[in-house]
Image (spheres, rainbow, N blue to C red):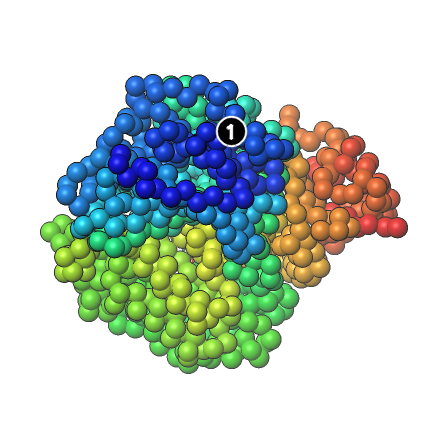
Amino acid sequence: MKARNTFAIALCALTFLCNAQTVIPIETKDFSMVFKTDAQHRLWNIYFGKKLKNTSDYKQIDEQYYFPDANAGIYNSAYTPSGTWNLSEPALQVKHFDGNRSTELLFRDVSIANQDGATVTKIKLQDPVYQLEVVLHYKVWSDLNVVEQWAEIINNEKGKIELNKYASANLFFTNKDFYLTHFQGEYLREMMPTEEKLTQGTKTVESKLGTRAMLLGTPNFIVSFENPVQEDSGMALVGQLAWSGNYKLEFDIDSNKNLRLIAGINPYESTYELQKGERFKTPSLIYSISKEGTGLASRQLHSWAKSHRVLNGNGDRLTLLNNWEATYFDFNEDKLSGLIEDTKHLGLDLFLLDDGWFGNKYPRNNDDAGLGDWQENKQKLPNGLGYLVQEADKNEVKFGIWIEPEMVNPESELFKTHPNWVIKQPERSAKLYRNQMVLDLSNPEVQDFVYGVVDNIFTKNPKVAFVKWDCNAVIYNAYSAYLQEKGMPQTHLYVDYVQGLYNVLERIRKKYPDVSMMLCSGGGGRADYEFLKYFTEFWPSDNTDPIERIFLQWNYTYFFPAITMDCHVTNWGNQPLKFKVDVASMGKLGFDVDVNHLTKDELEFSKRAIKNYNGFKHLVLHGEQFRLASPYQNPYASLMYVDKNKSKAVMFNYLSSNRFMERMTKRPIKMKGLDADKNYIIKEVNLNKNDEGSFVNPVKYSGDFLMTVGINPEINVKRTSVVLLIEEVK
Ligand code: DGJ
């Protein structure tokens, strides 16, 4: 403890001393999280809730709560260490340079700076015995009630240390009841929500899959305070750990019924060594806090994502025709040229060539060979990609390409030449996932290779305007020949893989800052806000059955704005084409159908609907989203997007359950987000040729009426989806 007196306490506007204890409020527009030191200079989280008018009131908060030392430790540490006084789940576990495993963290100083339109508070903690420093970062976009927080662990000890657990965030909440919604799934069933009331003990949500980490469970969550999740009322926290590898979220109700949340990289097989002088920056926990339920929380998060995170988040997106379900691996130049013409004919912006265009010695005619050999297949594409790019150019559409550069089939030249580049236990037989293995991105040579795949495509074909980056395998038999050769611990692999991938993406974005890229993962195993720094959009699921998509897309809307969500019309599902197009129009619209199989009416309808989409897409991509009726609580779903001036909006209504007993009764759906004092007319779009629709003759409604009484879109078995445009009239 002798170091205690030497700690300098840096004071700044938002920090103050009370009886020699430092109080640090971290405030957003509506909320605050408050830290306070004790006489020993330990730092405690004493408050997370509605902001108080007077900052000076914060110092009295902890007197009102009961934060005892319950033998197992005191639960509200700002970053819980292990091996000393604490016996609850730690945020940090360290083996020091001399082998000692005990850590204490005492407050050292705090500083505040402005960065990217946000306020960053840095709180420095230090072990009084070891030269180990932890800097907690809180980046706050006050108006949006969005916080991004992470930790930096700095080794100034005399030698190497081991990080056994190194969480990004250690939050503490004191409400009476907590409800957690987490999103688990499977291939084709991604992002399925479960809500549960948290009871004493720890609920863990985690992934150990290595690559497509979100496949079985996602790092997205909603914590609702006092009551189960409500759309428009109650305090809710909508968050995500922005890390594209193994993660662990621990929701721990302590013995005083308070909630601790410890979130970070999954420590499973991931002990990380830090050499003397090195530092480790954890990934970020990002969350939006709302006093008006999940609706506002999502809108805040969407605004943040568009303006501060997603690549080209406030820009445009390209509608497209994808050939995957139209051809699978079976295509040639002529067929593709035809599809390029169809792209133009339909009025879409871009043709996207999917899997199967590469590999010669091991041609990619199926998913069992060729992955890794990124040269055009001479039989299918004798004139190379360049010819197709030209064809697209001729047809005044853009060209996009599918790649899966992190993976390899054993049946490939790449694997035969570089068997050491794959992740695999040397003494064990390989376990394949979709006939493929994962390349070892901890190896800088492999990073160069993956970067080269993209760089070669763009260098040879500068007009390529879109990349679909797929990932269809998890990491089995985790072992890196590279780490072994370098004498580095194998437990670095899961972390170094992800960081290696970020390095590659960083390099790609340096050279090609603007090209649109879709994050795909054999469906929706990958979508997080660290990846979305480099990608413009993601693929939510290979499940494109429009009924399923209503639910899937609904669930993604809690966390991601529509501009990031790729939604394609395919042959999945037995619903009419109109229904499919209407569901896919709720994000970035694409088609993945054989245009020759469309009837004349369907073709005409598609062209009209694409034109309509182009007319209202600014509302979907840039408007504010309001979830109106949940398909989980009704036999229908309804959402709307409203522009900033509240003068234009688009409303999507879908019949999601067709049981006779559940069919929608004549009941209006209340709109949201309009101006009560404005008047609007409503027009139905995407009608089939001879349909009349219910809003053929524009009727004037006040915003007040639309939001208080609502309108009935008259969804029924004959009208399973209804898209309405709402426009202000003077
Ligand atoms: C999985 C993706 O989700 C599909 O859209 C398609 O690109 C295939 N991979 C291609 O192999």
Asked whether, in this view, residue 680 is left or right of residue 38, the answer is: right
Quadrant where the N terminus sits is top left
Quadrant of the image occupied by residue 151? top left
Asked whether, in this view, residue 120 is left or right of residue 485, the answer is: right
Asked whether, in this view, residue 68 is left or right of residue 302, the answer is: left
Q: As rendered, which of 137 and 313 lies closer to the eye? A: 137
Residue located beneath label 1 in the image: 59
Asked whether, in this view, residue 616 is left or right of residue 384, the answer is: right
Q: Is residue 335 above or below residue 116?
A: below
Q: What amino acid type is highlighted by mark number 1?
A: Lys
Q: As rendered, which of 456 and 95 lies closer to the eye? A: 95
Q: As rendered, which of 334 and 272 lies closer to the eye? A: 272
Q: Is residue 381 above or below residue 161?
A: below
Residue 138 in the image, given as x and y percentages of width and height: 46, 45
Quadrant of the image occupied by residue 456? bottom left
Ligand 1 rendered quadrant = bottom left
Q: How many marks?
A: 1
Determine the residue located farthest toward the left in the rendered image: 427
